[in-house]
Image (tube, grey):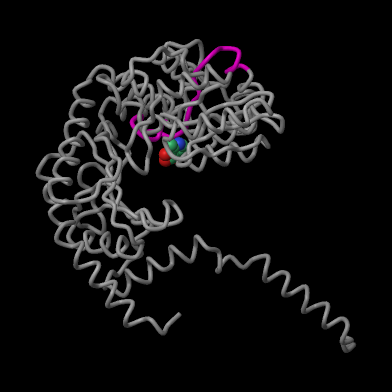
Amino acid sequence: MKKKSSKQTEQALKENAHENDLYNFNHARSKLSFERLIEMAEKMGMEKNPLFVCHERAAKATTQINGKEYLNFSTYDYLDINTHPEITEVVTNTAQIFGTSAGASRLVGGERPPHIELEHAIAEFYEVEDCIAYVSGHATNVSTLGYLFSARDAIFYDGLAHNSLVQGARLSGATKYSYAHNDCAALETMLKKHRDKHKRAIIVTEGLFSMDGNIPDLPRIIKLKRKYNCMLMVDEAHSFGVLGKTGRGVREYFGLASTDVDLWMSTLSKCMCGCGGFIAGKHELIEFLKYGSPGFVFSVGMPPVIAAACRKALEIMLREPERVRKLQHITRYFLEYAKGRGLDTGQAQGYAIVPVIVGDSIVTGFLSIALFKRGIYAMPVTFPAVKEGTARLRFFLSAAHKEEHVQQALDAVVEELPKAKASVEQYQREHQNER
Ligand SMILES: Cc1ncc(COP(=O)(O)O)c(C=O)c1O
């Protein structure tokens, strides 16, 4: 066999190193921060990874993990509709006709009656001309913003806008302006300074913010949209089914007209217990998206069973507004009880989502693990998902929760929080030489 020259060896080493770089994800920031949580959990005696926890049945007010029942505060099923027998029935019937797949992009062979019926029902719900349903909520935002806007345009978005909105803005190539969270004065300053530099502009906000559980001043944003000639997109992922007397969202909460907002967006994975997302608005806009938006045109249609399930969930929600009342009652109760026990609930307004702000990311992780050991499942949200120093446990409430559940969970938080702080101090003392 011929011996390799030193040049060849050098080249091979270079290629090897290059290849290693190519596949080396072990030092990625997000992976490392999750690994830290897993490592801490192990040191606290948790046998399993606290992430990717496997639930053995539908997660409602309680859930089952590893054969044990937990009080659950981590479900999007705000209205307690998931597993409703009418949904199971419609899913079974639809599967018998269409199977489980749309089979193709809807544009070219994947269109089925449940898609059309769902979109009609949502357009009617919003009192707008038309609606487009995408196969994923995240893709709805990425594809819509990415497709509608381009380099000459501007996207003004709330500083706490969901990742999918930010990714969509990035993809579009438009100039991005992120204004301080929920700060309309900051938004106006930006609009005054930059709006005229661009051809088209859009303001993007959410109906209920998923990290803080607070609501934007939408009437004021609508005035700004008119004054500065912008479009307006509202992501109702967490406000659809949650806000307003009958769950009609932020529009009902403020008594707005449907036409005040150009793009009503929501996911179907929260109150609608399915998956996917939609944009509702003017027919011309929806047609434009249906014929061009990549996440719709180049992606399979949502499974017909999911479309049928979501339509049924919408019907149940409108027929049983007591679910919305129950959710609003229990969240207000949670908020008041937490405040009464001296916990920091930040800007939460008492609708479905209430954070308990802890501050330090590691203490928050420890607290979540301590609660888990006591049979309470509430997930931590830490940096980089929220600003450093504002890590929190995020509680999702549901119409299925009872006041006793709330008391049990929050009493445990009050007891465990000082212990978690002390454990972290001890942990840091013991492990200070390891990094
Ligand atoms: C505000 C907001 N928009 C969009 C999405 C993405 O939706 P999905 O999870 O249904 O893809 C989420 C997800 O949680 C969200 O919170």
- Taking the spot 34% from the left edge, 71% from the top edge, the residue there is 40
- Taking the spot 34% from the left edge, 65% from the top edge, the residue there is 362
Q: Quadrant of residue 317?
A: top left
- Taking the spot 82% from the left edge, 81% from the top edge, the residue there is 10
The picture places residue 61, in percent across and down from the top left corner, at 20, 42
Q: Can residue 276 be found in the magenta stretch?
A: yes
Question: Ligand 1 is in which quadrant of the figure?
Answer: top left
Foreground pick, 114 / 192: 192
- Taking the spot 41% from the left edge, 51% from the top edge, the residue there is 386
Which quarter of the figure is the C terminus placed in?
A: bottom left
Query: Hey, which residue is sitting farthest left in the picture?
Result: 404
Foreground pick, 248 / 253: 253
Which quarter of the figure is the N terminus placed in?
A: bottom right
Magenta span covers which residues?
268-287
Q: How many marks?
A: 0
The picture places residue 427, in percent across and down from the top left corner, at 30, 77
The picture places residue 338, in percent across and down from the top left corner, at 17, 46
Foreground pick, 107 / 129: 129
Q: Can residue 146 be found in the magenta stretch?
A: no
Q: Does residue 49 sit above or below 430 in this rendering?
A: above
Q: Is 281 positioned to the left or the right of 196 in the image? A: left
